[in-house]
Image (cartoon, rainbow, N blue to C red):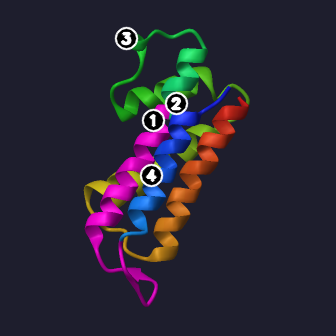
Amino acid sequence: MQKKEAIRYMENAKKILSNSPVEDNVYTDIKYVKSACGVAYLGVLKAIDEYLLSKGLTAKELPRKAEEYEKALQKYASVHDGKLLKQFDRIYNELHIAGYYRGLLKGADTVKDAIKAAKEFINKLRLQ
């Protein structure tokens, strides 16, 4: 299954992040960091949506809240282990809450690691 749209979101997130200057390994313009984190998180949601559609769900049945995404992952993607669910929880907390919503992520390594985790999640979901 292809995740072209989700990957496009990830590429856009990296591009947005590149607009922020970095001093001493810290992003100095939080606006770009928040935007990049938000776009990367949306890419993860897009990947889950695409995955669920491939499992037979209709567009109306797709999750609308983080809790619903967790339940859907638990039901459709975490048959063998709970790793995808744990990864989604990390991505939700780091990218969406800390990065986008609260603007707490500033360290370049931390932000890049969170975005990398999102891309890895998308790739793992692709292999399901």
Of the numbered discs 3 and 1, the one sitting upstream in the chain is 1
Mark 2 residue crowding within 10 angstroms, few (<14) / some (14–19) / many (20+):
many
Which residue, given by chain and number where applicable, does mark 2 sit on?
48
How many marks are shown on the rendered structure?
A: 4
Residue designated by label 4: 12
The span from disc 2 to disc 3 (Cα, nearest Å) is 14 Å
Near-viewer residue (87 or 43):
43
* Vertical comparison of 100 with 112: above or below: above
Q: Position of residue 69 (x, y in %)?
A: 44, 29
**Residue at label 3?**
60
Residue at image location 53% in from the left, 24% down from the top? 50
What's the CA distance linking mark 3 and mark 1? 15 Å
Query: How far apart in space, not on screen, are marks 1 and 2 (Cα)?
Result: 5 Å
Magenta segment range? 20-46
Q: Residues within 10 Å of mark 1 (few under 14, many from 20)?
A: many
Residue 111 in view here: yes
Residue labelled with disc 1: 45
Label 4 or label 2, whichever lies nearer to me, is 4
The location of residue 68, given as percent across then percent down, is: 40, 26
Disc 4 residue type (three-letter): Asn
